[in-house]
């Protein structure tokens, strides 16, 4: 296995995540897509760490990313809960009060 | 000992600050604040003086130098210098000042600005001590202006009187003339040496940093300050007018201390004066001595006589500096301070009595200072009379008095100079002739005031001796004119050797090239001339007193006949040689006319046509510009145009603001892709 295979996997994962974020209307689904993007980044970190001879730095970074993702998920779910309370749905297109 | 100096300097300043701000509210209108500060100053000066006598070291000197401010190259140092001259001067100033303070408590009792008067006296004492203690020219210059200020304030103390207000202005302005010269002199030295300290000045001169010509000019510039402050010809005109101030002030400032500041400065600077400068100084002193004594012969105002007498005696001191006998000049300064302050205070006592007598009989038009209104009051005011008589005797130079010793020494100096340089025989002549006149006018004053018939019986009956606060200082000052105070432990009344002469030693001239004789040579020459000078001065004094006796006591010679015979000379003297008139006509009036012309030009032509013209042109121009360019073009088209553009673009662009997050994300993504594409290219 070489570095390229990992990068290709991570790119596919990133594109899927981005696609999800842009197309999904369901707030929870958008969150899940964001997790995909973060994990794509994690794969990159570990792959570069493994093949770039950077000791364990990459692993440490990805651990931090995972922890941050957990925290982010908690905050984002709270936001979605509030959206649901205010608008009666979790469709993010309904939450468009900021338009002119 | 430096601490003593600092305390002596600062105590009167503290008293001044207290008095000027809260003096009126203090009990007894605060006079005790000033008095206690000046008494402590006196005690400190006396202890310094005793220390000096015990040490008995003519070269004693301590100095403390502080950096005032430092601006890179410019490093300005100030400090305090205490040597024998300083200590003696401090004692003179604080003693006379203390006596004047006590005297004033009675003399000024009825004045409504009593506390302010004492505040000014304290300010003066502070500044005078500052001059004495400074070890540098800058410090002296600062305090020099401060004594000028306090003199101005005190001369104009009764500023409701127009003559007093004018006299104070005159004193201030005339002094400025001298001070400009002094400032130029200080800067001439400073620009080469880079320091104001006397020490560096002496060092710079003796190491030949200056050419003889520069040194002459710079020395004379500095001396110009002394001409102004010590009222030397031709700037003497302010001192007689300064008598408009309260009499104790005349005694303190305009007889004993401030006017001696110029002489004191000349002592400090003596080592740097070149022979050319010294000759000029000697002539200025000699001319002043003679000139003022001639004017004093015919004056009728008791204070004017004393004022011209002061000018004349200051001329003696300057003459002594000029002929190199400056320690004798200093001796004369000290003895003169005592008896002249005494004379002024005595005249104050007489004026006080006359004033009250006139007040009592309801006469407000007669002049209480005019000697023609006095006469015969000897037995009415015995203490004043005997004090004044003794001071007069001292001033005339009669043996057994201090004035005899010092005047004799100065005259011996002038005589020895003239014998060595016969071309300058006039200097000795000036000295002896004015000694003759001095004896004459002083006894004329005594006879006119205290002897003869009273001119007004009613006034005469209402004259009483002044209260004790006023007579005690008189007695103290006149007793200080006994020779023994200055010659101790030498009991010979005809020789000035004593503690004073052994503690005040002349310095050698520092001018390079041995142009001036050394202090030792001068002393030898004066010693040779001494006996002859003593003989001459005694004869002229006797002659003067004799003439006064014949003319004003026994009335064998009628003074009116003589004045008629020499009408021209009499008028010249009586009108003070018309100096004021000449200044008015040839200096002040042309200047005023010139100023008026300039003012007219300024208003009529410059202001009316030029300044107003510019105004009008600007006004019209701005109308055109404002209307056409600003309003029509800039405001309407450009400013409003920008506003319209913003509104238009805003209304279109806000459509992008959909509120849908995913729209924004797509836009961001497109943006990133565009950036990548451009980077790749």
Image: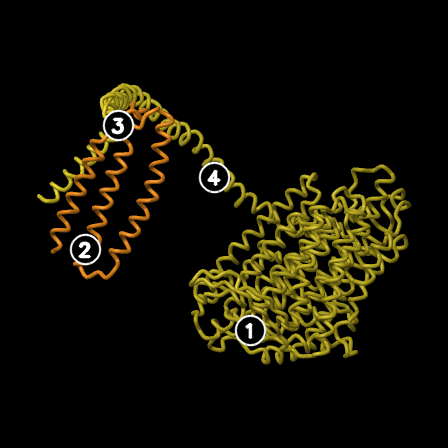
The answer to whether residue B634 is visible is no
**Would you call the spot at circle 2 few (<14 residues within 10 Å), some (14-19), or many (20 or more)?**
some
* Mark 2, residue position: A48
The answer to whether residue B34 is visible is yes
Kindly identify which numbered label has been placed on residue B421. Answer: 1
SS assignment at label 4: helix
Instruction: Give the spatial CA distance, label 1 vs label 4.
Output: 45 Å
**Would you call the spot at circle 4 few (<14 residues within 10 Å), some (14-19), or many (20 or more)?**
few
Instruction: Give the spatial CA distance, label 2 vs label 3.
Output: 36 Å
Q: Position of residue B648 (x, y in %)?
A: 24, 21
Q: In which quarter of the image is the C terminus of chain A?
A: top left
Instruction: Give the spatial CA distance, label 4 vs label 2.
Output: 96 Å
Do dots 2 and 1 share one subunit?
no
Instruction: Give the spatial CA distance, label 2 vs label 1.
Output: 111 Å
Instruction: Give the spatial CA distance, label 4 vs label 3.
Output: 87 Å
Q: Nearer the viewer, mark 1 or mark 4?
A: 4
* Mark 3, residue position: B660
Letter of the orange chain? A
Mark nearer the N terminus (3 vs 1): 1
| Chain B palette colour | yellow
Mark nearer the N terminus (1 vs 4): 1
* Mark 4, residue position: B594
| Disc 1: host chain | B
């Amino acid at each position: 296995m070489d570095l390229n295979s990992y990068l290709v996997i991570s790119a596919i994962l990133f594109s899927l995540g981005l696609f999800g974020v842009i197309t999904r209307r369901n707030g929870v689904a958008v969150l899940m897509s964001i997790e995909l993007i973060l994990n794509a980044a994690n794969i990159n970190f570990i792959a570069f760490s493994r093949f770039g001879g950077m000791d364990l730095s990459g692993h440490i970074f990805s651990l931090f990313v995972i922890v941050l993702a957990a925290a982010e998920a908690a905050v984002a779910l709270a936001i979605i809960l509030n959206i649901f309370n205010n608008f009666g749905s979790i469709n993010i297109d309904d939450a468009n009060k900021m338009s002119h | 000992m430096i601490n003593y100096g600092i305390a002596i300097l600062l105590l009167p300043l503290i008293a001044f600050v207290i008095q000027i701000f809260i003096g009126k509210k203090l009990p007894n209108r605060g006079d005790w604040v000033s008095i206690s500060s000046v008494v402590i100053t006196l005690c400190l000066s006396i202890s310094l003086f005793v220390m000096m006598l015990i040490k008995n070291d003519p070269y004693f000197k301590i100095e403390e130098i502080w950096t005032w401010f430092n601006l890179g190259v410019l490093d300005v140092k100030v400090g305090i210098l205490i040597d024998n001259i300083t200590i003696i001067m401090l004692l003179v100033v604080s003693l006379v000042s203390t006596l004047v303070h006590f005297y004033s408590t009675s003399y000024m009792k009825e004045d409504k600005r009593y506390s302010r008067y004492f505040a000014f006296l304290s300010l003066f004492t502070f500044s005078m001590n500052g001059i004495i203690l400074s070890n540098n020219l800058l410090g002296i210059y600062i305090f020099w202006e401060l004594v000028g200020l306090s003199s101005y304030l005190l001369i104009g103390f009764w500023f409701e009187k127009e003559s007093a207000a004018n006299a104070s202005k005159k004193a201030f302005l005339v002094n400025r003339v001298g001070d400009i010269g002094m400032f130029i002199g200080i800067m001439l030295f400073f620009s080469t040496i880079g320091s104001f300290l006397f020490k560096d000045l002496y060092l710079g001169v003796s190491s030949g940093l200056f050419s003889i010509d520069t040194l002459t000019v710079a020395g004379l510039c500095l001396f110009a300050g002394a001409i102004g402050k010590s009222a030397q010809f031709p700037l003497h005109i302010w001192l007689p007018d300064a008598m408009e101030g309260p009499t104790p002030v005349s005694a303190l400032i305009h007889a004993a201390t401030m006017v001696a500041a110029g002489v004191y400065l000349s002592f400090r600077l003596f080592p740097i004066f070149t022979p050319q400068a010294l000759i000029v100084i000697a002539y200025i002193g000699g001319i002043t001595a003679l000139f003022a004594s001639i004017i004093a012969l015919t004056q009728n105002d008791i204070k004017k006589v004393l004022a011209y007498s002061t000018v004349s005696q200051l001329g003696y001191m300057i003459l002594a500096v000029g002929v190199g006998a400056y320690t004798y000049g200093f001796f004369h300064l000290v003895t003169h301070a005592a008896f002249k302050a005494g004379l002024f205070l005595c005249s104050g006592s007489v004026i006080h009595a006359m004033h009250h007598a006139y007040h009592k009989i309801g006469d407000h038009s007669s002049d209480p200072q005019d000697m023609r209104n006095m006469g015969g009051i000897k037995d009415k005011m015995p203490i004043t009379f005997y004090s004044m008589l003794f001071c007069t005797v001292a001033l005339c130079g009669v043996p057994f008095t201090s004035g005899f010793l010092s005047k004799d020494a100065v005259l011996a100096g002038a005589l020895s100079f003239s014998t060595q340089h016969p071309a300058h025989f006039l200097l000795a002549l000036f000295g002896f002739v004015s000694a003759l006149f001095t004896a004459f006018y002083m006894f004329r004053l005594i006879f006119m005031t205290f002897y003869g018939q009273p001119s007004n019986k009613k006034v005469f009956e209402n004259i009483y001796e002044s209260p004790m606060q006023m007579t005690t200082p008189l007695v103290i000052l006149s007793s200080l004119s006994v020779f023994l105070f200055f010659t101790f432990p030498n009991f010979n009344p005809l020789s000035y050797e004593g503690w004073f002469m052994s503690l005040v030693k002349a310095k050698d001239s520092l001018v390079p090239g041995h142009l001036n004789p050394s202090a030792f040579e001068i002393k030898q020459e004066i010693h040779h001339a001494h006996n002859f000078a003593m003989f001459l001065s005694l004869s002229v004094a006797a002659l003067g007193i004799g003439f006064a006796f014949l003319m004003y006591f026994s009335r064998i010679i009628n003074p009116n006949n003589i004045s008629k015979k020499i009408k021209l000379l009499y008028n010249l003297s009586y009108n003070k040689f018309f100096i004021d008139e000449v200044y008015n006509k040839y200096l002040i009036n042309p200047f005023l006319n010139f100023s008026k012309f300039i003012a007219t030009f300024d208003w009529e032509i410059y202001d009316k046509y030029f300044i107003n013209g510019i105004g009008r042109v600007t006004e019209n121009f701005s109308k055109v510009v404002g209307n056409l360019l600003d309003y029509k073009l800039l405001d309407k088209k450009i400013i409003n145009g920008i506003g319209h553009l913003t509104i238009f673009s805003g209304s279109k662009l806000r459509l992008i603001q959909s509120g849908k997050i995913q729209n924004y994300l797509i836009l961001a993504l497109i943006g990133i892709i565009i950036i990548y594409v451009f980077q790749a290219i």
